[in-house]
Amino acid sequence: MVIYLIYYLIIKMSAQPLLKIKSKIILNKIISNSSKIIKFNLIKYNKKIQKRLNVNINDYEEEFSPIEIKIIFSGNKHGQFINFDKMNEKYFHIYADNKEYKKNEIDNEIKEVKITIDYQIKSFSKLFLDCTCIESITFNKFNRTNIIDMKQMFDGCLLKELNLSNFNTKNVIDMSYMFNGCKSLRKINLSKFNTDNVTDMSYMFSGCRLLKEINLSNFNTKNVMDMSYMFSGCRLLKEINLSNFNTKNVKNMSFMFICCESLKELDLSNFKTNYVKNMSKMFSCCLLLKKINTINFNTENVTDMSGMFSCCQSLKELVLSSFNTNNVVNMNHMFGHCIKLKKLNLKNFNVSKVINSYNMFVGCRQLTEENIILENNM
């Protein structure tokens, strides 16, 4: 009875009465009978209690342990370095030169800061959105599993270095726009990424124009439904190995590789596209692309193929024998300006529902009526 009375008082007051309890057994009893949140709050910032109970705060409760981020500023220190929108500032602890700061208090002479984020934060959406004054971000500690949203997390950052080796994405659902517009980033190590629960990867790497290589071999995309604009504008990417991609639930692949100007070959033979409805401009402006393997594409539900291969100026041939166009309504500019394309077999194309086929072959200099094989209904 006495134990529970003390327990009640501690919860109602503060953690300070714990320090006056000399019995380690009673102290342990009080802590162990607390709920997880209360328990963590009682010990998380009290090193004396941690020492008396022999508690390592970093291992005590993984889901509640703080996330620590190290940030190095670039030469330009004007503008925000972290977004507090829709979040409570008290859950963010900012340290520079071993002193705690509040938002907008960072001195211009300080180059490096550490941010500790408490367990109350469950979303990292827009956390570093348009934070153009950061050169490097390192996640020193990231044991928590309660983060479910990383949409636009680094969107618009001018980062040169991003260390995600300790990143935990186990329960993340949304990664759309995550690295969108990171136009100074040359490489990203995603080997520790767990994408088992992700449903949205649209615009994920869009606009990463200096990105030369990316390893997605660890990606599990079985639950992803949207891959639109995923690699759009990755101008320096020379190859992307997507052999492990599971696309069985994807509905939107529009603009997926648009303006990947350095890609020379794409093997998408493992792609399952049964549920895809939109493939508009999927490969548009892939200027150096010479070969696309779409032999296993199932396009029976696709309604939009407008600009799908437009401006693929190095393509000499396309094998589209697997294409089912029964439900396509838009083929506008589908092969427009494929200036090296010499032959097209569209014998299996059904265009009975097509409303717009304007400029379908415009600018195809080497493609004549004789080497376009069509059915009469074309």
Image (cartoon, rainbow, N blue to C red):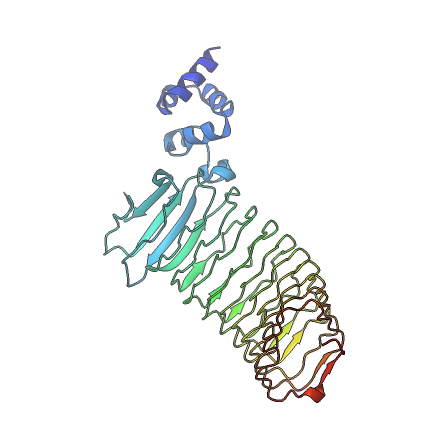
Q: Is residue 225 above or below residue 261?
A: above
Decide if residue 196 is on the left or right side of residue 233. Answer: right
Name the quadrant containing residue 130: bottom left
Decide if residue 254 is on the left or right side of residue 319. Answer: left
Q: What count of labels does the image hold?
A: 0
Name the quadrant containing residue 279: bottom right
Which residue is painted at 54% across and 76% down in the image? 285
Q: Is residue 350 above or below residue 219?
A: below
Q: Is residue 125 above or below residue 15?
A: below
Q: Nearer the viewer, residue 155 or 63?
A: 155
Which residue is painted at 57% across and 70% down in the image? 281
> Where residue 146 sits in the image (x, y, percent)?
52, 41
Q: Is residue 18 above or below residue 211?
A: above
> Where residue 21 sits in the image (x, y, percent)?
39, 19
> Where residue 203 sits in the image (x, y, percent)?
51, 61
> Where residue 71 sits in the image (x, y, percent)?
36, 54
Residue that sits furthest to the top in the current view: 1
Decide if residue 243 is on the left or right side of residue 167. Answer: right
The C terminus: image quadrant: bottom right
Which residue is painted at 35% across and 24% down in the image? 16
Q: Nearer the viewer, residue 246 or 12?
A: 246
Decide if residue 332 is on the left or right side of residue 23. Answer: right
Q: Nearer the viewer, residue 76 or 286?
A: 286
